[in-house]
Image: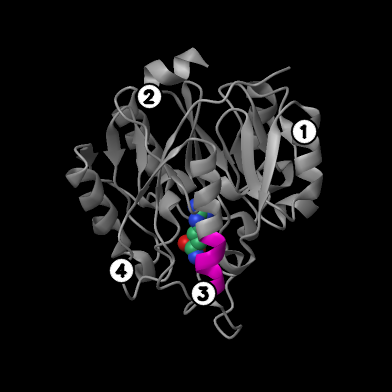
Amino acid sequence: MTHTPTSRRYLMCRPTYFAVDYAINPWMDPTAPVDTDLAIRQWSALRQVYLDLGHTVDEIEPLPGLPDMVFAANGATVVDGTALAVQFLNPERADEAPAYAAWFERAGFEVQQPKAVNEGEGDILLAGELLLAGTGFRTAHTAHAQVQEIFGRPVVTLQLVDPRFYHLDTALCVLDRQTVAYLPEAFSPGSRAVLRRLFPDAVIARPADAEVLGLNAVSDGRHVVLPSQATGLAAALRERGYEPIGVDLSELRKAGGGPKCCTLEVRGAESRREEGKA
Ligand code: ARG
């Protein structure tokens, strides 16, 4: 089966002030050394991959004192030209929220304010006409109702159970409108059953791939940009007709992030029409 890519618009934030100064997930060890220059080089290579694929990349200005701001996926959820701003669980990241909201205001998007803890595309992923919404560690279950109300698409709540996979985008990747890849062990029994029902043809990931944040991947419907260390998942994707593209984000992984965490998809008012074509 051949998969047709669609061109995308992404928002990214250069890791100029990247560091691991605090620990808000099990990946983070503030006593371990971090090479910010290497993080910037790895991030630049990721950005270049998107440009080479023909995607548009916008950048938001990084702010000093916000070492996790590189993880743009947590900056908003953007569908059909509406941006739902975020509310972080951890005070360390709180000041990122208004910075991202202001970017969307300036870019001409309608911006809605969150009513509960909501960490953006880290936990809310568009899959065809559905919004898959994670909860359990960061985004509050009560936030899911607002997500459904604002975007007018059915929200499917998925319960995360493994603290290493604290955001939905560390445990599940949307490959195209019909297909996802995920790690069953990261979900509660009921959520696993929901995923089996919705996506009987899903690519099932192995723990070894998820443990290098392999599922923190970005797909344009054909090319799947994922951590180069996730070799098993890359092989499984190739077998299914996708084109895996490995990138090394080892330095950013020290904060618990991979390619998807660094990438916020910006879906303008035209998104519904564009995606419908694929
Ligand atoms: N250190 C960040 C945090 O714990 C990493 C965020 C990763 N982002 C993501 N979309 N999974 O909040």
Tag 2 residue: 271
Residue 40 part of the magenta-drawn span: yes
Q: Amino acid at mark 4?
A: Leu
Tag 4 residue: 63
Q: Are the two marked residues, 3 and 4, in contact with CB atoms closer than 8 angstroms?
A: no
Q: Nearer the viewer, residue 43 or 100?
A: 43
Image quarter where the N terminus lies is: top right
Mark found first going from the N terminus, 2 or 4 = 4
Q: Are the two marked residues, 2 and 3, in contact with CB atoms closer than 8 angstroms?
A: no
Answer whether residue 167 is visible to the viewer in this image. Answer: no
Quadrant of residue 159 within the rendered picture: top right
| Residue 66 horizontal/vertical position (percent) | 36, 70
Circle 3 crowding by C-alpha within 10 Å: few under 14, some 14–19, many from 20: some
In the image as oriented, which residue stretches furthest toward the bottom?
A: 31
Mark found first going from the N terminus, 2 or 3 = 3
Tag 3 residue: 37
Which residues, given as a range, are shown in magenta? 37-43
SS class of the residue under badge 3?
helix
| Measured Cα–Cα span from mark 2 to mark 3 | 35 Å
SS class of the residue under badge 4?
loop
- Checking the image for residue 238, the label placed there is 1
| Residue 60 horizontal/vertical position (percent) | 32, 55
Q: Is residue 172 left or right of residue 152?
A: right
| Measured Cα–Cα span from mark 3 to mark 4 | 16 Å
Circle 2 crowding by C-alpha within 10 Å: few under 14, some 14–19, many from 20: some
Q: Nearer the viewer, residue 197 or 270?
A: 270
Mark found first going from the N terminus, 4 or 1 = 4
| Measured Cα–Cα span from mark 3 to mark 1 | 32 Å
| Residue 85 horizontal/vertical position (percent) | 29, 46
Q: Amino acid at mark 1?
A: Arg
Q: Amino acid at mark 3?
A: Asp
